Image (cartoon, rainbow, N blue to C red):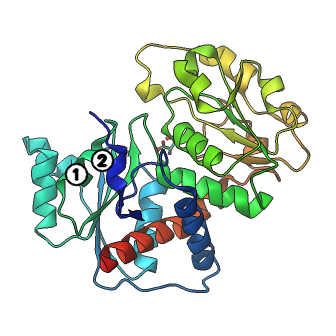
Amino acid sequence: MKINHDIQLSDGKLKHFLNINNLPKSIIEDIINRAEEFHDNSKITKYTGKVVASLFFEPSTRTKTTFELATKKISSDFINIDIANSSTSKGESIIDMIKTIEAMKCNMFVVRHSVPGTAHFIAESVSSDIAVINAGDGSNEHPTQAMLDMFTIKKHKGSFEDLKISIVGDILHSRVAKSLIFALNTLGAKQINIVGPKKLIPDNYTEMNVKYFEDMSEGISYSDVIIMLRLQKERMHDALISLDTYYDEYGLNQSRMQLAKKDVIVMHPGPINRGVEIESSVADGPNSVILNQVSYGISVRMAIMSILFDNHHAS
Ligand code: ASP
């Protein structure tokens, strides 16, 4: 599917939230600032009467639940379309389904799909008063995850300019990694390392303004932030790596933690696989902010939804 990055902005304003690629720094900062207000409970605007429909064609726990909580916290209604039992299983196309839900007066769609570009395609098809949020499109992007990751880093580290950030694991199939790299570059992180076996690194990594390390110890040394990724086995056509050696070579354990800075924060978008990419004592240890990320996800998703509602209201 061809991805049209331009569709999310109209007159310079965010009308949909589809990708971090091409998103101006000012909008990323606005989202972080608004999320901060929501997180402090200092200013929560109500969007009573707005209806958000979630369309998750792929499984999700964190993203879907935090979207639901975020919707309720801004006083809007959340409807959960049961995809497995929906008419798409009777052959109805996604667009016919969207048009049907639109007729029920929905204001926003939150979409997760295994095919890259699905949320963009829906955004191009809905009427102009409806906002679409990409909650993950295949191996392309996961922009709301990147925003909550930026919020987490800002909260724990203050700013981005002096940070060395290492992203470890299956970069090739990870939508989280792609959105993260775009966001970190836009916010001016000092150094972004990607670490993993060559087979799990995209061919075009040289265009991403990152440093590649095949060796984990080198890749995470003196890091301020380590972001661990899950092996996206659902997107691997062949067994690209052996699980027996993966943990030995790329698992984040206590001894490897000594290589990073003492105050390093450890992040993971979840779901975590203990003993596959991360040792339990690290995931649960004092440097881990993995559960904080989940909590921040609520405020960040509230911020994104409220900005979209405001922008649609103003136009
Ligand atoms: N939850 C994240 C995603 O949906 C990361 C993962 O599944 O590994 O992409």
Q: Is residue 199 above or below residue 14?
A: above
Where does the image place residue 252, in percent across and percent down from the top left? 75, 33
On residue 120, the disc is: 2
Front residue (pair 308, 263): 308
Q: Is residue 81 left or right of residue 60?
A: left
Where does the image place residue 40, in percent across and percent down from the top left? 65, 80
The residue type indicated by label 2 comes to His
Front residue (pair 89, 297): 297
The number of callouts visible is 2
Quick one: SS at disc 2? helix
- Determine the image quadrant of residue 106: bottom left
Q: Quadrant of the C terminus?
A: bottom left
Where does the image place residue 163, in percent across and percent down from the top left? 79, 46
On residue 124, the disc is: 1
Quick one: SS at disc 1? helix
Q: Is residue 196 above or below residue 93?
A: above
Q: Is residue 169 left or right of residue 279?
A: left
| Residue at 26% over, 54% down | 123
Residue 271 shows up from this direction: no
Q: Are marks 2 and 1 in contact (CB under 8 Å)?
A: yes
| Mark 2 crowd level (few <14, some 14–19, many ≥20, 10 Å Cα) | many
Q: Quadrant of the N terminus?
A: top left
Front residue (pair 306, 250): 306
